[in-house]
Amino acid sequence: MTVTVSATLAVNEALNEKRRQGVRVLPLGFGEAGLPVHPTMRQQLTAGNGVNAYGPVAGSAGLREAAAGYWERRGLPTDPAMVIAGPGSKPLLYSLLLELGGDTAIAAPSWVSYAAQSRLVGQHPIMVPTAIGQGGIPQPDLLHTAVVDARGQGRTVNAVVVTPPDNPTGTVADVETVRRLAEVARELDLVIISDEIYRDLVHPVEEGQKQVEVHSPAEFAPERTVISTGLSKNLALGGWRLGVLRLPDSKIGHRLRGGLLGVASEIWSSPAAPVQEAASHAFTEPVELRDHIDRSRRLHGLVARKVSRVFAEAGAAVETPSAAFYLYPDFAPLREQLASLHGITTGPELTDLLLHRFGMGVLPAVEFGESPAALRMRVATSLLYGDTEEQRYTALSATDPLALPWIRAHLDRLGEVLDALLGKVPSKVIPQPEGVVTTVAG
């Protein structure tokens, strides 16, 4: 089969090319955490740079024990022997889908790689819609119907993928939705793959508001839930490539463990040893790293909520994000206006226009498993914090990061682009280097 570059990586490369051409860009497409490496993690990586042996396929004993402690502190007792580490969540997920076999049910919308990896291993993913505000969890009743129908057609369906908190919507499903999902999975004998990479990035709430809580399906179906996490989001260490799986201590989990270790031994042998050493320290959650994550949660929340308000003021429908650094505005209320002004009738047409005319990088809903007709888009806010390490540290520590000049400039630019898109202000074309042109409000 033909495999194309992941949409998130592709849009990032497209924006980098526009920068090289001298175009002013709005980097809202790439889901990178956008924050600097904490000094403690730099020190830990340096300290482990002499560790050069392959090590155990499942990961070092120290890393697996530390990861088990991480889950233990979240109410999920974990045997270190049931933890497997790998070079990032992506290869772990791919190996899990390969080992499970059959087809997999996946939330729509959901992270672009779930369906893509499902197809890579020869599956036919079953896309099941989520409810508004319940991102990352397929509607349980629809899941039941979809799996029963697929099996009635002779298909084998073995698993369902969920994401609490969610990418792309930035929302967190409530406890009853997760509980019902677990009940359906048990009834239909599905393995639940719960990608909890954003679990530590629930936004703090303002005084008087109720704090959002993340509930793992492992609370309600512990015997069949596999959890994945890593350090790429909470500590912004995506480039270090380290992920961990928590397998259930059950017949299902022990069967999966043997197969996963076999796959891992033939693909990556073991994760990078110095990174494992540093990750072992991170999963113990020392106070300085907890403080760093707390400040990042606050920054993500302030910026994502402000960006969601800008979209809402423009007329888009958008659920206020409560975790991570994403939002998922819907331009359906503006469909007639967009068709009249630009001839736009699909999501890809809308996001292409935003990219090529305004230098604004976002991803259409079709990339997340929805119809091309949907005018929804995934907006990632985490690259607005600054272009330099100094700016990003300043954003983390600022009392009011929204007032920082570089963040304020991005927010103002977003308002200008949306106003120009919707014909609220005139637009003008400004020549750029090498013959490139871009349209800006003015």
Image: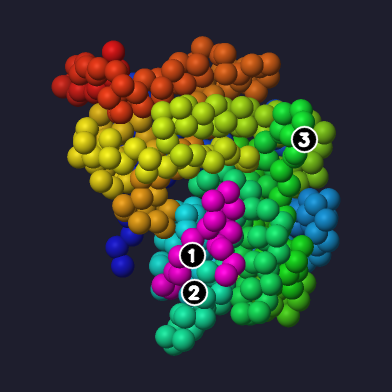
Residue labelled with disc 3: 290
Q: Quadrant of the N terminus?
A: bottom left
Q: Residue at x 45, y 69 (%)?
A: 126
Q: Residue at x 62, y 32 (%)?
A: 301
For the C terminus, the image quarter is top left
Disc 1 designates what residue? 128
Query: Residue 229 in the image: x percent, y percent?
Result: 65, 53
In percent of width and height, residue 282 lies at 74, 42
Name the residue: 82% across, 33% down.
287
Q: Quadrant of residue 182?
A: bottom right
As helix, strand or loop, the secondary structure at mark 3 comes to helix
Magenta span of residues: 123-141
Colour scheme shown: rainbow
- Residue that label 2 marks: 146
Q: Is residue 62 visible?
A: no
- Which secondary structure type mostly characterizes the magenta part of the structure? loop
The alpha-carbon separation of the residues under discs 3 and 1 comes to 35 Å
Q: Could you tell me if residue 321 is visible in this image?
A: yes
The type of residue carrying mark 1 is Val
User: Which comes before the other along the chain, label 3 or label 2?
Assistant: 2
**Of callouts 3 and 1, which one flags the residue occurring earlier in the amino acid sequence?**
1
User: Real-space Cα distance between discs 3 and 2?
Assistant: 41 Å
Horizontal side, residue 93 vs residue 370: left or right? right
